[in-house]
Amino acid sequence: MLHLYYSNHLETQKALLIRLLGLQPLSDPFQSEQILVQSQGMAQWLKQQIAENCGVAANIAFPLPASFIWHQYHRTLPNVPQRNAFEKESMQWHLMALIPTLLLLPEFAELKQYLSGQPQTEQQKLYQLSGKIADLFDQYLVYRPEWITAWEQNNDQAVIQAIMQH
């Protein structure tokens, strides 16, 4: 069951969470408690606070809202893949496959030069660059969805104009 608790004070929410974990434990000890958080930093802080107040913080999952919702889609709807193609990790692997094909184009000569070198170093640079680009796209999905919409519609002018305004 999904329960939402609102407060402007983090300490109030933390105290309520700790109290609820004590008062309403899950009936199955092998089932993990799901607590949605806005960031991994928040998840880490909550784990520490729960452990400090309860003695231990075990079998608690702290998914971000988007991954929690995707998981629910996957569980309840047919033909929904297990992994969201727009997760950073998925985008990173897609970019790692795409970028080498683009290096053959003259527009990407500088990128090709940056990535060239020892094969091991080349793969490491490609992995790091793909991660940075995936992180940037992930931020665009959250903070600049209109840019993504413009790209999907091949509206390059709208994208360039939006970038210039910011």
Image: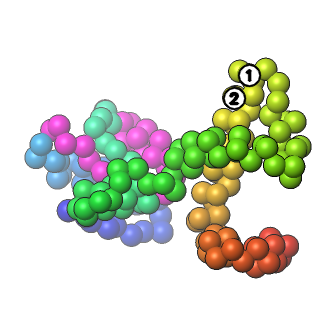
Which colour style is shown? Answer: rainbow
Residue at the spot x=18%, y=52% of the render? 23
Comparing 2 with 131, the one in front is 131
Per the image, label 2 sits on a secondary structure element best described as helix
Could you tell whether 107 is left or right of 148 in the image?
Answer: right
Say if 41 sits above or below 165 in the image: above
Comparing 10 with 68, the one in front is 68
Q: Are marks 2 and 1 in contact (CB under 8 Å)?
A: yes
Inspect the magenta stretch and tell me whether residue 41 lies in it.
Answer: yes
Residue at the spot x=68%, y=55% of the render? 136
Could you tell whether 128 is left or right of 164 in the image?
Answer: left
Q: Residues within 10 Å of mark 2 (few under 14, many from 20)?
A: some
Q: Position of residue 89 (x, y in %)?
A: 53, 44
For badge 2, the amino acid type reads Gln
Q: In terms of image quadrants, where is residue 137? A: bottom right
Comparing 17 with 31, the one in front is 31
Locate the C terminus and report the quarter of the image it occupies. Answer: bottom right
Comparing 99 with 45, the one in front is 99
Identify the residue under disc 1.
119
Identify the residue under disc 2.
123
Inspect the magenta stretch and tell me whether residue 130 lies in it.
Answer: no
Q: Position of residue 95 (x, y in %)?
A: 63, 46
Say if 118 sits above or below 80 in the image: above
Residue at the spot x=12%, y=43% of the render? 28
Locate the N terminus and report the quarter of the image it occupies. Answer: bottom left
Q: Is residue 129 visible?
A: yes
Query: Range of the magenta residues?
Result: 29-53
Q: In terms of image quadrants, where is residue 154? A: bottom right
- As measured in the structure, the alpha-carbon distance from the residue carrying label 2 to the one carrying label 1 is 6 Å
Q: Is residue 41 visible?
A: no
Say if 143 sits above or below 110 in the image: below
For badge 1, the amino acid type reads Pro
